[in-house]
Image (cartoon, rainbow, N blue to C red):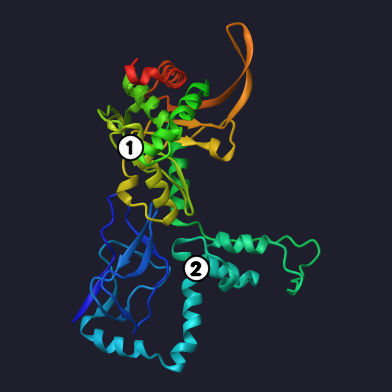
Amino acid sequence: MIIDVKVPMLSESVSEGTLLEWKKKVGEAVARDEILIDIETDKVVLEVPSPQAGVLVEIVAQDGETVVADQVLARIDTAATAAAEAPAAAPTEAASAAAPVAAQNNAAMPAAAKLAAETGIDVNALQGSGRDGRVLKEDVQNAAAKPAAAAAPAVALPTGARPEERVPMSRLRARVAERLLASQQENAILTTFNEVNMKPIMDLRAKYKEKFEKEHGVKLGFMSFFVKAAVAALKKYPVVNASVDGKDIVYHGYFDIGIAIGSPRGLVVPILRDADQMSIADIEQAIVDYAKKAKDGKIAIEDLTGGTFSITNGGTFGSMMSTPIINPPQSAILGMHATKERAVVENGQVVVRPMMYLALSYDHRIIDGREAVLTLVAIKDALEDPARLLLNL
């Protein structure tokens, strides 16, 4: 029986995707639930599994094509399973000779293979950092940047050469660019700054981190404290947790906090739903899980959908201060930065404290400066006196 392989249903906010690379060729046997191809959308990469075991008899849509939900991608003959398995056990000499070529094609993503061909890099000699060991464009760029070995033939470049490379944006990068530009054009964005003494949180973490990890099976980080502090502040100033819908202000009676996470494909912002009901351990575990999913390319569309407020940590990369851009339709975002020891005055004395600059960008259409400043102060106060979070002060 011939059955169709179709594009899975996409979310309401995703209308189409791009086929990356077929993992099977026409005539090859496929197992039930074996991944046949990945589809890159502007949010996530979707895996398309085989609905049944059989033989891939037709590929309808090729690598790089734009596809929509429920579109036919390929066809499988389920009755040809046995016939396909027989030659697999004893491959012909020609098939054996072709195997390295297929492996090479499957080892590198299209952009990586293209760049490798242009720069003379052997993708088979690279250790891929992508999912399932695939060679990414970044792997080829890193290899090209390394000095060539002494025994390797040198590739001469003309003196004064000014090389350029033009590559298309990934769907995720293009979508991020589109949303950030729209955010700046459609929102009246202002940013207010403050600084927080991180010593109380650092002391608390140092005191309990070993017991915490032993009890909960996850490390105690700093982000969970910021999430809890943000939720406490949003409860005091609900408009910062609201959003604009036309001429209406939508006040959300829940707290879905987006956490910005870097991934090989770019920035993603998975959501901690009902963060006010999560424990410190729940938050830390969720962040670890999301980070792993982002690294492995397993973030799902539902992980990224929604959100009433976001937190981004540029300090991870050494940023001292920034003005984060609001993630629509949210109305505010908190920016964390690097913690540095600085001289501050306490009770008339100059002391050294681990200080962090905080930034709160907000939509001035619905959030006045007063609410924005007081929200950031409330976050600062909760972090400098963590007991406030326990006592709801």
Disc 1 marks which residue?
A: 282
Q: Which mark is residue 346?
A: none
Q: Secondary structure at mark 2?
A: helix
Query: Which part of the image, by quadrant, shows the N terminus?
Result: bottom left
Q: Is residue 72 left or right of residue 229?
A: left
Quarter holding residue 55 = bottom left
Q: Nearer the viewer, residue 271 or 169?
A: 271
Residue 28 in the image: above or below residue 231: below
Callout 1: 10 Å neighbours few (<14), some, many (20+)? some
Residue found at the very far top of the displayed protein: 348
**Place of residue 49 in the rendered image (x, y in percent of width and height, measured from the top left):** 29, 68
**Place of residue 318 in the rendered image (x, y in percent of width and height, measured from the top left):** 59, 37
Q: Is residue 160 left or right of residue 371?
A: right
Residue 177 in the image: above or below residue 228: below
Asked if residue 328 shows in the view, the reply is no
Q: Earlier in the sequence, mark 2 or mark 1?
A: 2
**Place of residue 15 in the rendered image (x, y in percent of width and height, measured from the top left):** 32, 55
Disc 2 marks which residue?
A: 110
Asked if residue 327 shows in the view, the reply is yes
Q: Residue at x 47, y 54 (%)?
A: 265
Residue 223 in the image: above or below residue 291: above
Residue found at the very far right of the displayed protein: 159
Amino acid at pointer 1: Asp
